[in-house]
């Protein structure tokens, strides 16, 4: 009897009939095309799978739900191929366009650190998917061989003979596949506009950290003690649980030395290094929060500790994004003016149940622009900032094992805030443009792919977005004066026959930054729209006073203290000193300083009066949580003797846990 849950069509968002349900079962399309939603309870917390976020449209906010379009998609022909140029010819080929508009060069940025790129790619993992990449790497790896010519899904990128890089090689093809869509997965008919499908929730909710499935989280994530996530301790470092078999995503671990591979609810934690690092860090943040909560509230059970820690963890991630990273990138005044952030520390409640929790297709594409600022040569430093060595990031994708040896995790961590990001300019790091996926492919130009995907998603011409964002028409190349960089206007004219031919991502590559911002004008516009949507459409938004289990005013004031540097001091290996604003390069006004000077959460506002019958134990735990704030430099030293009772609980909980004889009070350090 399924009376407690309803099946929704993932695309349309309507409940489906029993007959339709059985048809999907027969076609084996339930996974992508159907969302199962348990009856909503308006008072429950944020669900893992995003369901019931909007009580009127319960599947909106779940995985496999569609993006919103700022402008109607444009395709050509019955097969929904990319739109054509005004002349009726195909648009200019991707690779030569990319090498002209966005040439290879490695130029360090003068303002931002690597932390920006890593945080942004972690945000990407929270709202998008990697299955389109897995598709051409693993499932259909033949797109540059004869077999590929027979497969419609193959859309390889051709390299011309006069290519600036590959004229010196014999590589003439880069393998690539069409995006997975509701059509390819059998949810919509093939004669409808291709509509991309993704696996994350379209909400900022750490959905790839906790996963979107209660059972998976129970199996792989939760320790079911004291609100903690499972963890392992090795050489004094805390890790998410690992798999000892090889069937996970760590394809590039160099055996036999490199064996570590996360066994978290979602294997994506093992993918790009920025996703990997922030997954490790937010995993630890969860546990440090749960431990601090347990210290002030000894009567809270595992469930209450877990759920509260998860909420604070999510709020921390969002607070850092909205109030630290975005203002640095886009300008504080711009964000205040547009309503992305509030100038006041207290509550704000802009929830509108008519706005669906969705991301725009343009936001998904706009995030790709950040490939421009990815510096691929990761410099590694010791805790005092002495240079140790470097590693190309493209060599450590799908290679969690690298982090597990030679103090690499520590050194990389230091590099995140000591090394500049790639320049916010019109150049792409040569490795991102030519290597891309490291040893997984012969050659991958991520930025050419950005252009090809832009077309296969059917995004409207750049000029239409200019009109949308600026409120006036753009009819000629001359209308782009003041919009794009002058020298780039010449190249645009060379490459595109008509101004309306210009692709959205190409326009963003060559645009001038928006006023008071480091982002290109049109990207700024797309970001402003989406970030307001995030907060307006999310019933569980952390700044709301009127939501289930809302923070109190005093709790929210603690969340306001979140900074990326505070996070690094709490959970970053060997981080005992850091600049206060570590998305920005250290230097005058942002000098590296002791972690003692970096603000951190105080968990007193979470003290639950109903626990306070038993004072002796809560006092003791309290003093240890105070310790934590001052002594940030002992993440490695294993304390401690206070909780001998937890020894036993822990060792029984997890057979493959290398830390089974450690006690969970590690988190009380
Ligand atoms: C070492 C650094 C990075 C590498 C090697 C990398 C690699 C890739 C690759 C191979 C793809 C798939 C391309 C395709 O199939 O079309 C991709 C997609 C993407 N990347 Fe990156 N990336 C990196 C950094 C970043 C950063 C810093 C961001 C920041 C926002 C980012 C955002 C995206 C987005 C939004 C997509 C599209 C995902 C989707 O549509 O589902 N990437 N990246």
Image (cartoon, grey):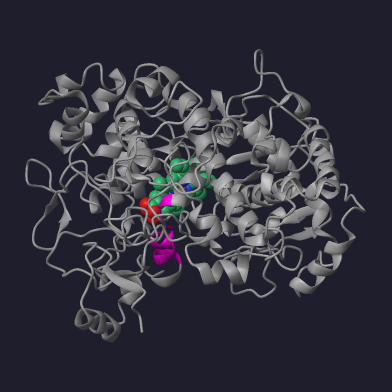
Q: Residue 592, position in %: x, y?
A: 72, 23
Residue 133 lies within the magenta run: yes
Q: Residue 293, position in %: x, y?
A: 69, 47
Vertical position of residue 22 compared to residue 566: above or below: below
Q: Is residue 75 left or right of residue 277?
A: left
Judge by depth and name the residue closer to the eye, 486 or 29.
29
Q: Residue at x 61, y 56 (%)?
A: 304
Q: Residue at x 63, y 59 (%)?
A: 399
Judge by depth and name the residue closer to the eye, 223 or 100.
223
Q: Residue 169, position in %: x, y?
A: 45, 51
Give the residues in magenta.
Answer: 127-137
Q: Residue at x 15, y 24 (%)?
A: 471
Vertical position of residue 535 compared to residue 328: above or below: below
User: Is residue 433 visible to us here?
Assistant: no
Residue 637 lies within the magenta run: no
Q: Residue 42, position in %: x, y?
A: 39, 55
Please identify the quadrant where the N terminus is shown: bottom left
């Amino acid at each position: 009897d399924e009376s407690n849950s309803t099946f929704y069509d993932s695309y349309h968002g309507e409940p489906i009939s029993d007959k339709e349900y059985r048809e999907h079962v027969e076609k084996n399309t339930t996974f992508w095309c159907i969302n199962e939603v348990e009856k909503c309870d308006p008072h429950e917390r944020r669900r893992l799978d995003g369901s019931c976020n909007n009580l009127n449209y319960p599947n909106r906010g779940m995985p496999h739900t569609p993006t919103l379009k700022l402008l109607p998609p444009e395709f050509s022909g019955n097969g929904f191929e990319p739109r054509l140029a005004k002349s009726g010819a195909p648009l200019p080929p991707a690779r030569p366009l990319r090498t002209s508009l966005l040439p290879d060069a490695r130029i360090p940025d003068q303002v931002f650190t690597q932390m920006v790129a890593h945080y942004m790619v972690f945000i990407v993992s929270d709202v998008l998917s990697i299955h389109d990449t897995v598709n051409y790497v693993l499932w259909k790896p033949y797109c540059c061989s004869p077999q590929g010519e027979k497969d419609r899904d193959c859309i390889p990128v051709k390299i011309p003979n006069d290519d600036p890089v590959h004229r010196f090689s014999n590589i003439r093809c880069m393998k690539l596949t069409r995006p997975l869509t509701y059509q390819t997965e059998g949810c919509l008919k093939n004669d409808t506009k291709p509509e991309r499908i993704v696996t994350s929730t379209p909400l900022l909710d750490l959905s790839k950290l906790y996963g979107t499935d209660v059972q998976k989280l129970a199996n792989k994530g939760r320790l079911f003690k004291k609100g903690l996530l499972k963890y392992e301790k090795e050489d004094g470092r805390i890790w998410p649980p690992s798999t000892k078999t090889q069937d996970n995503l760590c394809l590039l671990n160099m055996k036999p030395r490199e064996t570590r591979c996360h066994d978290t609810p979602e294997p994506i934690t093992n993918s790009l290094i920025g996703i990997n690092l922030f997954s490790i860090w937010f995993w630890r943040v969860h546990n440090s929060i749960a431990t601090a909560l347990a210290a002030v509230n000894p009567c809270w059970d595992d469930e209450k500790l877990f759920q509260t820690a998860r909420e604070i963890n999510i709020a921390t991630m969002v607070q850092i994004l909205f109030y630290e990273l975005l203002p640095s990138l886009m300008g504080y005044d711009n964000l205040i003016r547009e309503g992305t952030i509030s100038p006041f520390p207290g509550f704000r409640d802009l929830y509108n149940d008519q706005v669906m929790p969705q991301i725009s297709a343009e936001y998904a594409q706009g995030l790709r622009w950040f490939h421009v600022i990815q510096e691929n040569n990761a410099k590694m430093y010791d805790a005092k900032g002495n240079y140790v060595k470097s590693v190309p990031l493209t060599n450590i994708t799908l290679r969690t094992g690298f982090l597990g040896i030679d103090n690499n995790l520590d050194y990389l961590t230091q590099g995140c805030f000591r090394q500049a990001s790639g320049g916010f300019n019109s150049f792409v790091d040569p490795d991102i443009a030519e290597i891309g996926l490291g040893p997984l492919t012969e050659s991958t130009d991520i930025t050419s792919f950005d252009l090809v995907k832009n077309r296969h998603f059917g995004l409207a011409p750049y000029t239409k977005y200019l009109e949308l964002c600026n409120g006036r028409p753009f009819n000629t190349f001359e209308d782009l004066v003041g919009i794009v960089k002058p020298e780039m206007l010449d190249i645009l004219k060379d490459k595109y026959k008509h101004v309306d031919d210009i692709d959205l991502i190409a326009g963003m590559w060559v645009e001038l930054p928006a006023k008071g911002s480091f982002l290109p004008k049109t990207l700024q516009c797309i970001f402003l729209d989406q970030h307001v949507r995030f907060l307006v459409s999310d019933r569980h938004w952390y700044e709301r006073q009127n939501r289930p289990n809302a923070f109190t005013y005093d709790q929210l004031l603690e969340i306001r203290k979140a900074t990326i540097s505070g996070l690094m001091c709490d959970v970053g290996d060997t981080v005992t000193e850091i600049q206060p604003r570590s998305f920005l390069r250290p230097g005058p006004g942002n000098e590296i300083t002791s972690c003692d000077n970096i603000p951190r959460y105080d968990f007193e506002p979470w003290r639950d009066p109903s626990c306070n019958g038993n004072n002796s134990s809560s006092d003791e735990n309290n003093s240890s949580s105070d310790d934590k704030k001052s002594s940030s430099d002992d993440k490695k030293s294993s304390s401690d003797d206070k909780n001998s009772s937890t020894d036993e609980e822990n060792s029984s909980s997890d057979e493959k846990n290398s830390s089974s004889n450690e006690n969970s009070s590690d988190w009380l350090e």
